[in-house]
Image: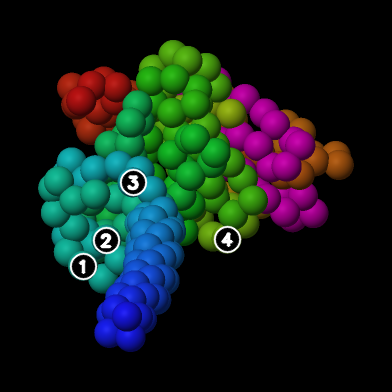
Amino acid sequence: MTRLRVDRCAVTSSIDHLTVGNKTKSAVNERVSITKTLLALLVSASLVAAPVWAAPSSSLGIVVYADRAQVGTAQASVGATVFSGDRLSTEQTGSVQVRASAARLLLAGASSATFSQDDATPAAMLIGGTATFSTANSKAFALHVASAVIRPNSDRPTIGQVTVLNPKELIVRSTRGSLSIAVEDDVREIPEGAAYRVVLDPNAADPQGPRGAGSGGYGRPPIKAAKSRFIWFAVGVTAVVTVWALHEAFESPDRP
């Protein structure tokens, strides 16, 4: 009987040991499961956040022609992507053309501009020189010069040209379609074939200089001056579209 009792105690002890072992394994498995869950959550969070951390600036256009031109400090080349914030510049005898959706922008020699975006509209700030743009609709492109914004005035195919004379003066020409020029709430239309010298300082004196051809000259009084955000002077009529503007690819900015 005594031996039987010893065996029962041994069996009971083994069962208790087994129970404790199972509980320990269960606790370990639970901790492993929790650890795996936490790791999975961390990985998921990193995957969600990674595109935000690594997202590049939005692509605005592609270089379709480049000759002695730079994107930032690098040499511009055909096929290069232009992003918001990129600065394009040309040497004295260089030029560069960018296609941006339904618009194209050409920088002439000794010119520079920085690309940006106005809401969903590709845009650029012309810093110096001359820029010519072609658009297929009124929301295709906007060109900024200091406080002025020049854009197409309608959904007709439009070609406009802007030359910066100094930080407060520019020449705006429309060779096809009409343009809209706005400085804050002062908005005016430049009809097809017209060219205007725009002075962004309303208090600037009437400049003296040679008279332009066609519809007016520098010596004429401003068309609109009192309490305006800018004043302008008719400097002539654009009678001939430039050879570049007649180029088939530029005439159809909405083509791929």
Image coordinates of residue 166 in percent, x first then y, are 54, 60
Q: Amino acid at mark 4?
A: Pro
Asked whether 29 or 89 is in front, the reply is: 29
Q: Which residues are magenta?
A: 181-206
Q: What's the distance in space between the residues labelled 2 and 3, CA to CA? A: 14 Å
**Residue at the location (53% across, 47% down)?**
144
Are the two marked residues, 3 and 1, in contact with CB atoms closer than 8 angstroms?
no
Disc 4 or 2, which lies upstream in sequence?
Answer: 2
Q: Which residue is mark 2?
A: 71
Q: What's the distance in space between the residues labelled 2 and 1, CA to CA? A: 5 Å
Q: Which residue is mark 4?
A: 167
Are the two marked residues, 4 and 2, in contact with CB atoms closer than 8 angstroms?
no
Image coordinates of residue 69 in percent, x first then y, are 21, 59
Are the two marked residues, 4 and 3, in contact with CB atoms closer than 8 angstroms?
no
Determine crowd level at label 2: few under 14, some 14-19, many 20+ residues with C-alpha closer than 10 A.
many
Which label was assigned to residue 74? 1
Q: What's the distance in space between the residues labelled 3 and 1, CA to CA? A: 17 Å
Judging from the image, what secondary structure is the residue with disc 3 in? strand
Which label was assigned to residue 214? none
Residue farthest toward the top in the current orientation of the protein: 156
